[in-house]
């Protein structure tokens, strides 16, 4: 899982497999966002999940949020080679209006 | 989807020089951000900007850094003078609302020699 002082996590799986990436956060937030960053590009948002939602789906993606344990997960079903990227979770610091990114998970999908 | 443009894509300068990184945010967005990323690692928040003012800045936003968006033109990050440790990719982002999605540009790779 990502966050804190951990190094960038890395996962390598075969195309077609499912994968779940985890994220834990330290401070109160009303919003958790998941971003994907492909090589040489800026991050692009995949899913935004609010504190009153436990789960949110978008196509092959599914995000969960557990505010009691301050953790979130992003699952991808039926991975494709094009899913290869770094995946970041990000939490909103409500008082400061800034989005704080986790360390990221580097996902490699082998064709 | 909405596009944020960053100019230039790569900038090489000598240590001590001034550099200005330019960002053309999404037209109707109100919140603007700069993030710093080293070697594809964590995205580190530098500063956010709303209504012509800096809202929040991190410890990475040194005194040599400044931001502005004069008259709705480019949102700029200026570093004067630059230091070796400023070498990184700088990402600009904009958002219609502070609780909403951030739209990122492709980044400007700054190399300080």
Image (spheres, rainbow, N blue to C red):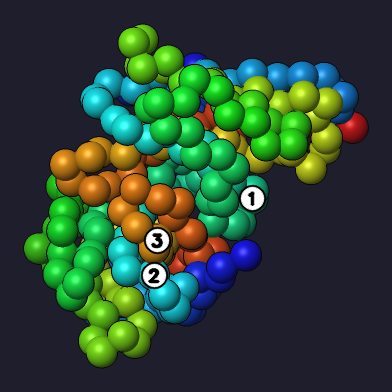
Instruction: Kindly state the secondary structure of the residue where label 3 is placed.
Output: strand
Spatial CA span between label 1 and label 2: 26 Å
Horizontal and vertical percent position of residue A11: 66, 22
Q: Earlier in the sequence, mark 3 or mark 2?
A: 2
Residue closer to the observer: B34 or B8: B34
Q: Is residue B110 left or right of residue A109?
A: left
CB under 8 Å between discs 3 and 2: yes
> Is A12 drawn above or below residue A58 in the view shown?
above
Residue at the spot of label 3: B95
Residue at the spot of label 1: A39
Q: Is residue B28 left or right of residue B65?
A: right
Instruction: Kindly state the secondary structure of the residue where label 1 is placed.
Output: loop
Could you tell me which chain the residue with mark 3 belongs to? B
Horizontal and vertical percent position of residue A60: 75, 32
Horizontal and vertical percent position of residue B73: 34, 87
Spatial CA span between label 3 and label 2: 5 Å
């Amino acid at each position: 899982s990502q966050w804190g002082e951990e190094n960038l996590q890395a996962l390598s799986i075969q195309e077609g497999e499912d994968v779940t990436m985890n994220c834990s956060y330290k401070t109160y937030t009303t919003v958790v966002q998941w971003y994907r960053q492909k090589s040489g590009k800026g991050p692009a948002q995949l899913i935004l999940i609010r504190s009153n939602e436990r789960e949110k789906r978008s196509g092959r993606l599914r995000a969960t949020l557990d505010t009691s344990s301050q953790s979130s997960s992003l699952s991808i079903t039926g991975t494709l080679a094009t899913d290869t990227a770094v995946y970041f979770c990000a939490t909103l610091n409500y008082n400061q209006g800034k989005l704080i990114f986790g360390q990221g998970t580097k996902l490699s999908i082998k064709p | 989807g909405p596009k944020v443009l960053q100019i230039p894509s790569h900038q090489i300068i000598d240590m001590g020089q001034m550099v200005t990184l330019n960002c053309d945010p999404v037209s109707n967005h109100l919140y603007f951000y700069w993030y710093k990323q080293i070697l594809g690692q964590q995205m580190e928040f530098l500063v956010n900007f709303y209504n012509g003012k800096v809202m929040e800045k991190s410890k990475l936003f040194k005194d040599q850094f400044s931001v502005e968006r004069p008259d709705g033109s480019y949102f700029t990050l200026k570093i004067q003078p630059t230091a070796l440790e400023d070498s990184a990719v700088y990402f600009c982002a904009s958002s219609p609302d502070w609780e909403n999605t951030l739209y990122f540009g492709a980044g400007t790779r700054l190399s300080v020699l």
